[in-house]
Image: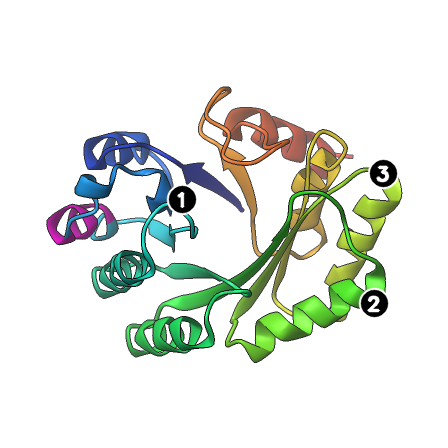
Amino acid sequence: MICVSIAERTADGCVKALSGLELAEIRMDAMEAHELSEPNIRRIFSMPLKLIATCRPGILDEEHRRSALAYAIEYGAAYVDVEVESDDGLKSDIAAKARSKGCKVIVSYHDYKKTPPSEELRQIVEWCFQSGADIAKISCMANSEKDNARLLGLLDLGRPLIVIGMGERGRLTRVVAPLLGAPFTYASSSMGKETAPGQIDKARLERIMEDLKGI
């Protein structure tokens, strides 16, 4: 399954971008702060499709970020994404809120420079699940084919796991991981709308995956 990552500045832009989709990630950290009101979050997350609520740190203060994620869960998010490095209190609060609403918790790890060694990656996966993950997401910059192999090898752990190799070299993982058991992969809505290095647009990714299935 393909999850389209949406990073629009306004609630109107998010609603428009979601038309015709089945699964999407709302990058609330990309929205203008005044757009992240409770009514706007309700409007987006009560739409009849599966949505992932994501609000990366660094843009909003922690209290605003926590409340935005909580509102998204309250109004119908199917998944919520929290970073494994986040404060333990935030992680436990969001996980408890999510479970009370039947929302799945994605605990994510990102390394924008490199892919760690295999043993370190396995330790990070364990950290994610110890932090309350229903699904762990490991996203690392792939600088070689061996980096892709290490990331895809994590799927052999037999746990609910999303793996992504960022950058041009990592594009292979975005195509192959869901075919090897990952719950889904991420795509942009169109060229120029990427939210991460190496992200492929949805239409192209669908074509590539269909071609591979036919081999």
Q: Which residue is mark 1?
A: 24
- Name which of mark 1 and mark 2 comes first in the sequence: 1
Which mark lies nearer to you, 1 or 3?
Answer: 3
Looking at the rendered structure, the secondary structure element under dot 1 is strand
For mark 2, does the 10 Å Cα neighbourhood hold few (<14), some (14 to 19), or many (20 or more) residues?
few
Span of residues in magenta: 38-44
Q: What amino acid type should be assigned to the residue bearing mark 1?
A: Ala
Q: What amino acid type should be assigned to the residue bearing mark 3?
A: Ser
Instruction: Look at the image and tell me whether residue 100 can be seen.
Output: yes
Q: Which residue is mark 3?
A: 144
Measured Cα–Cα span from mark 3 to mark 2:
18 Å
In the rendered view, tell whether residue 159 sits above or below residue 171: below
The residue drawn where x is 45% and y is 38% is 4
Queried whether the magenta region covers residue 175, the answer comes back as no
Q: Main secondary structure of the magenta part?
A: helix
For mark 3, does the 10 Å Cα neighbourhood hold few (<14), some (14 to 19), or many (20 or more) residues?
some
Q: Which residue is mark 2?
A: 119
In the rendered view, tell whether residue 189 sits above or below residue 94: above
- Name which of mark 1 and mark 3 comes first in the sequence: 1
For mark 1, does the 10 Å Cα neighbourhood hold few (<14), some (14 to 19), or many (20 or more) residues?
many
Q: Residue furthest top?
A: 191
Q: Position of residue 107 (x, y in %)?
A: 52, 64
In the rendered view, tell whether residue 117 sits above or below residue 207: below
Q: What amino acid type should be assigned to the residue bearing mark 2?
A: Glu
Looking at the rendered structure, the secondary structure element under dot 2 is helix
- Name which of mark 3 and mark 2 comes first in the sequence: 2
Specify whether 178 is left or right of 170: left
Q: Position of residue 64 (x, y in %)?
A: 26, 57
Instruction: Look at the image and tell me whether residue 158 can be seen.
Output: no
Looking at the rendering, which quadrant does residue 170 occupy? Answer: top right
Q: Residue furthest left?
A: 39
Measured Cα–Cα span from mark 1 to mark 3:
29 Å
